[in-house]
Amino acid sequence: MGWTIRGRTGEWELVCGLEVHAQVISKAKLFSAAATAFGAEPNTQVSPVDAGMPGMLPVLNGFCVEQAVKTGLALEAEINRVSIFERKNYFYPDLPQGYQISQYQKPIVGRGWILIDLPDGGTRAIGITRLHLEQDAGKSLHGAREGVTLIDLNRCGVALMEIVSEPDIRAPEEAVLYLKKLRSILRYIGTCDGNMEEGSLRCDANVSVRRVGDPNFGTRCEIKNVNSMRFVAKAIEYEAKRQVDILESGGVVEQETRLFDATKGETRSMRGKEEAHDYRYFPDPDLLPLELDEALIERLRAELPELPDAKKARFVRQYGLSAYDAGVLVAERAAADYFEKVAAGRDGKLAANWVINELFGALSRRGLEIDACPLPAEALGELLDLLAEGTISGKIAKDVFQKAFETGRGPREIVEAEGLRQVVDAGAIEPVVARLVAENPQQVENAKKNPKVVGWFVGQVMKATGGKANPGLVNDLVRKALGLE
Amino acid sequence: MSLDRATVARVADLARIAVPEEQLEPLVGELAKILAWVEQLAEVDTGGVEPLRSVHPIRRAWRADEVADGNCREAILANAPERENGFFVVPRVVE
């Protein structure tokens, strides 16, 4: 994307990698049989295992393993046939065990990559370093009462996939595109719902800067808490500029963890807030090495749906769409499916235009997701048929679309009930043309010198007929009446 | 492996054990002896031997993805020093 920071002493380049925590879709937790559903009453979805009761043993949820493997396959990553669960020791009230069961030296998934879709329709590969399985912690509520923190362990022990990217990101906006693409893939394969508001998808960013052309990496800071698409780019940009300022004033960037404050739009040091960590990882003696066999991996590979990149390429090929439009349509699987229903047996480009411009526009104005779309794909298809048959004009079609979207009535029904059929009878239009010509002698003269004025007459006729006249026919009749044939 | 007071104090801190200053020095001696005893294992040449990950004869013990536990808030909160509206109450942490 060619993004640089222009400092006082020259141009600087951003080097950024993301660590994404994606909550696995499963009924039960990673190592216990307690439920994972979001929004339950506090501490009602906690088993003695999650509460760290003495003597309780973790037992691995096989489905969570399958979800991680599926994700690895979708990221075209290496699947490690043997991986190891380790204990990451730290003391915090949202994790009663006193350690998080995670994977360290041998994660379940190794190197892979994601193609991000650039605004110009091109793509760029961002490497994936690893994906590992680990337990989520509980939730801490601060500020409910002075001097205390409230703890809800419902989330404690839910399976997380930590997905770590290579430091391949070079522009704040690329980080957003990476997150969007990752979220899209996870939702396609159903391994994470990608809901950032509910915390199912959380993001930390590792940020450093270096002078353009410098092959070495600078010292990086880890930015925590960039938990919305809107703030990812902001947080990274702020942090990169902060580091450039430090370096240009002769200072040194200290490797540290910083917190993004969304209200102030800045990052600040967490030093002092967190004690020096010493995780003392070691293999969890309560758990066996995680072994995967080929049959399982192949079954999961066969279960993968058509992924966004493949679908995008097919849409370009099959429907003649631009790469950009195809990319917009495939971001959500439900939207892609909707488009294909509309496009079936019709003009693909026209269908894409209506879905992207009219439908997505109407949905976002109402704050709706495609799943809650009040207009069925069949109805939008019917509207396009009315347009293709010449029953209604393009302008009327947009009005019918709005009515159908708001009321749920069928487009054909609306056209019939409200008499919106296009007038294709020359006999009905000619008197209107004749009247307008008679009333506007000056414009008639103008039209003879400047052909653009013909358009003015066409517009007046369309207005006079409530937009129902066929524009092509009106054009012909106006030209004839003006003696321009 | 040599051990000093600072290391012992740090290990105690990580383990959340409050060790009075005067007990640090005796602990240095005791822990050093334990470490020395364990270090006898280093005499065995394990070059080229894969680490033994488990002594269990089974290779896989996975559970099905079924909810069969939880929903026992009273029992979970029974040992809490303080509770409020179903939450554990702890001294305020971080900001």
Image (cartoon, grey):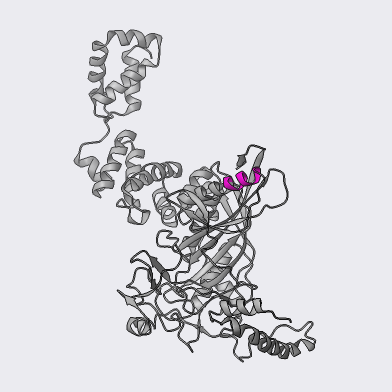
Q: Which region is colored magenta? A: A241-249
**Residue A388 against residue A125 in the figure, above or below:** above
Q: Is residue A315 something one can see in this rendering?
A: no
Report the label total: 0
* Residue lying at 22% horizontally and 41% vertically, measured from the top left: A416
Quarter of the image with the N terminus of chain A is top right
Asked whether A134 or A82 is in front, the reply is: A134
From the viewer's perspective, is A401 left or right of B29? left
Which residue appears farthest toward the front when viewing the image? B22
From the viewer's perspective, is B33 left or right of A151? right
* Residue lying at 37% horizontally and 53% vertically, measured from the top left: A370
Quarter of the image with the C terminus of chain A is top left
Q: Is residue A372 something one can see in this rendering?
A: yes
Residue B86, image x, y percentages = 32, 76
Asked whether A211 or A105 is in front, the reply is: A211
Q: Quadrant of residue A206?
A: bottom right
Q: Is residue B20 magenta?
A: no
Residue B19, image x, y percentages = 56, 82
**Residue A432 against residue A392 in the figure, above or below:** above
Which residue appears farthest toward the left when viewing the image? A417
Residue A194, image x, y percentages = 45, 61
* Residue lying at 53% horizontally and 45% vertically, measured from the top left: A323
Q: Quadrant of residue A480?
A: top left
Q: Quadrant of residue A441?
A: top left
**Residue A474 against residue A332 in the figure, above or below:** above
Residue A7, image x, y percentages = 62, 39
From the viewer's perspective, is B3 left or right of A389? right
* Residue lying at 64% horizontally and 73% vertically, measured from the top left: A106
**Residue A292 against residue A367 in the figure, above or below:** below
